[in-house]
Image (cartoon, rainbow, N blue to C red):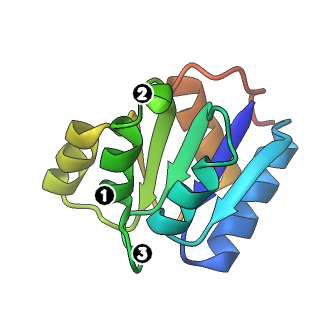
Amino acid sequence: MTVMIIDDAVTVRMMTKTFLQELGFTHIHLAENGIEALELLEDVESLDLVLVDWNMPYMNGVDFIQNLRAKPGFRDTKILMITTETAMEKVVQALEVGANEYMMKPFNKEMLTNKLQILGLDVPLCP
């Protein structure tokens, strides 16, 4: 399973990567913003899962999702928006542009696992 984590905070990227590795994910790509993520897509044949922050420089998460969904090979990629944006209109906006799920920061491994299970991914239950 191929995953991309897009977040401008290096600590969030590393923490999320560690959680995913502990859940058995091995093909993990990292990007600091939406533009870098779109550039990485040129070397990735498919993505099963994207975890993307909302607020990033150069290209935010909403704009990235719109760009990703416009690409035929990535229309079925599962997208989890992970953000500090808590307003209901933000949740609705993220889902309307193509996110499949929404998770608030800060989060832990158990919260991430629950969201991945909601997305239908085969991940082990947290002890």
Q: Residue at image x 30%, y 56%?
A: 62
Residue designated by label 3: 56
Q: Is residue 16 visible?
A: yes
Residue 63 is marked as 1
According to the picture, the residue beneath numbered tag 2 turns out to be 72
Q: Quadrant of residue 100?
A: top left
* Circle nearer the N terminus (3, 2): 3
Label 2 crowding class (10 Å Cα cut-off): few <14, some 14-19, many 20+? few
Which is in the foreground here, disc 3 or disc 2?
2
Q: Residue 42 placed where, x, y %?
A: 61, 48
Asked which secondary structure carries label 2, the reply is: helix
Pick the front one: 97 or 83: 97
- Secondary structure under the numbered disc 1 in the rendered image: helix
* Element carrying mark 3: loop
What is the crowding at mark 3: few (fewer than 14 residues within 10 Å), some, or many (at least 20)? some
Query: How far apart are the alpha carbons under marks 3 and 2?
Result: 25 Å
**What percent of the width, then of the height, locates residue 123?**
73, 27
How packed is label 1: few (under 14 Cα within 10 Å), some, or many (20 or more)?
Answer: some
Q: Work out whether 75 lies above or below 25.
A: above
Q: Is residue 111 above or below residue 73?
A: below
Residue 34, image x and y in percent?
Answer: 46, 63
Name the image quarter holding the C terminus.
Answer: top right
Residue lying at 30% horizontally and 58% vertically, measured from the top left = 63
